[in-house]
Image (cartoon, rainbow, N blue to C red):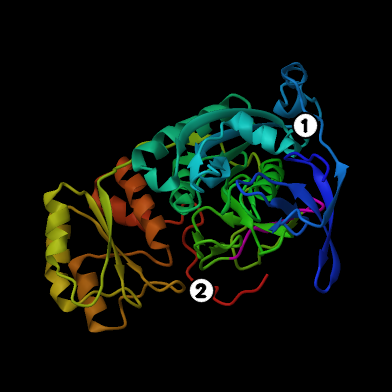
Amino acid sequence: MMEIREGDRIRIKKETDSGVVVYEGIVMPTASRNIVIKLDSGYNIGIRPGNAEVEVIDREEVLTDEKKERGGVLNKTRKEDLPILAILSTGGTIASKVDYRTGAVSPQFSTEDILEAIPELGEIGNIRGKVIYSILSENMRAEYWSKLAAEVYNEIKNGAEGIIVTHGTDTMGYTAAALSFMVQTPVPVVLVGSQRSADRPSSDAAMNAICAAKVACSDLAEVVVVMHGSTSDEFCFIHRGTKVRKMHTSARDAFQPINDIPIGKVYYDTNDIEKIRLEFFSAYMKRGEKELELRAKLEEKCCLIKFYPGADPAILELFIAQGYKGIVLEGTGLGHVSAEWIPGVASAIKRGIPVVMTSQCIYGTICDRVYDTGRDLLHAGIIEGEDMLPETALVKLMCVLGQTTDMEEVRRLMHENIAGEIKGRSMKGCIF
């Protein structure tokens, strides 16, 4: 077998019991003696080299430091016809590598590493980058959102025509909502991640990043999430930052809109963007329509409590005793908790702690006017969370309490549609 190395495009002919089969793809790292290649479909296969005929079809040139300095994959030479794009890295799987000894994934990529791994980004924009955090997304904190929002603001102020934020997928919805409320942007702010690191089987990192870069060059001016729209490498969806949730633990098309539809699709083969907004949904904000504004102050002492049958209402007092200033409840159905919780809710509100009701149901809107329990909650002073996702309501409450502690103003702002977070109707079953 001829010498092959990582990154080579190879063709393998292998004898099997059913005849000769042919595979073609990119050589990936492996800790075994097998050959691992990434197929054009995006999936990886491992092949035992015995009785295999291997042909190198294409070998990428190894770039020297001198070539990188002249532009190369690091895109240090400005191309006048391309927009300035800023990549802000926070870590996550898209900025991770596999330790092939242990099989574990950890955040190890810098922004330069991402550019080197995905050189196509340099053909889309003039890239500048900064590592803000190198963490897995479960380690994200509310205080980190304030710094990230300030970094986004500064990049736009300093001439970036589009922002790409690389982020772990598990809590990306929270961060997307936070940036939606904290940064009023005249340019695209695109969050992107991957379900599988670049050297894992069927990685989605490159496609997601390339599609995100195309969106960062587009005419929209909102905070959005760009991720795989199907299990194959066909297109990515553009999701509004306040209406998207990760709906599968590992599938590449894990991100889905909730009570909304995507803003559009980005086709991987052509990089074309197709807008799919419908008339009864608010149009997306367009580039330059709003002035740049930063609202970085947050009230971090807000909590999200999930109600369940038999849950002890004393949990409310536990959070209040710890100094929490706002509470979001994830209630049942139309927005309910058991009758024994209502005195605790009323007590919290009387002490100046706003309580927002959301639903454990995926689709639909809150309505506490149907059943007695709901009416009692309204009488106690609950704030209905409309059709907001519980996590979006939590982040919004943090942002609102960062601006005001006046209960009536808090109520008004929580009912105001600030960043497309309130639609007021269910979109269950929409197919795009």
Can you give x and y, in whole percent of width and height, for residue 192 in the image?
58, 47
Q: Which residues are magenta?
A: 261-272
Can you give x and y, in whole percent of width and height, for residue 238 in the image?
63, 55
Amino acid carrying label 1: it is Leu
Q: Is residue 347 above or below residue 35?
A: below
Q: Residues within 10 Å of mark 2 (few under 14, many from 20)?
A: some
Kindly report the secondary structure that dominates the magenta region of the rendered protein. loop
Instruction: Name the residue at 72% across, 56% down.
Output: 48
Can you give x and y, in whole percent of width and height, for residue 307 in the image?
26, 70
Query: Considering depth in this image, is 231 or 370 the residue closer to the camera?
Result: 231
* Image mark for residue 409: none
Which structural element holds mark 2?
Answer: loop
Residue 270 part of the magenta-drawn span: yes
Instruction: Name the residue at 13% across, 75% down.
Output: 340
Name the quarter where the C terminus is drawn. bottom right
Q: Which residue is mark 2?
A: 426
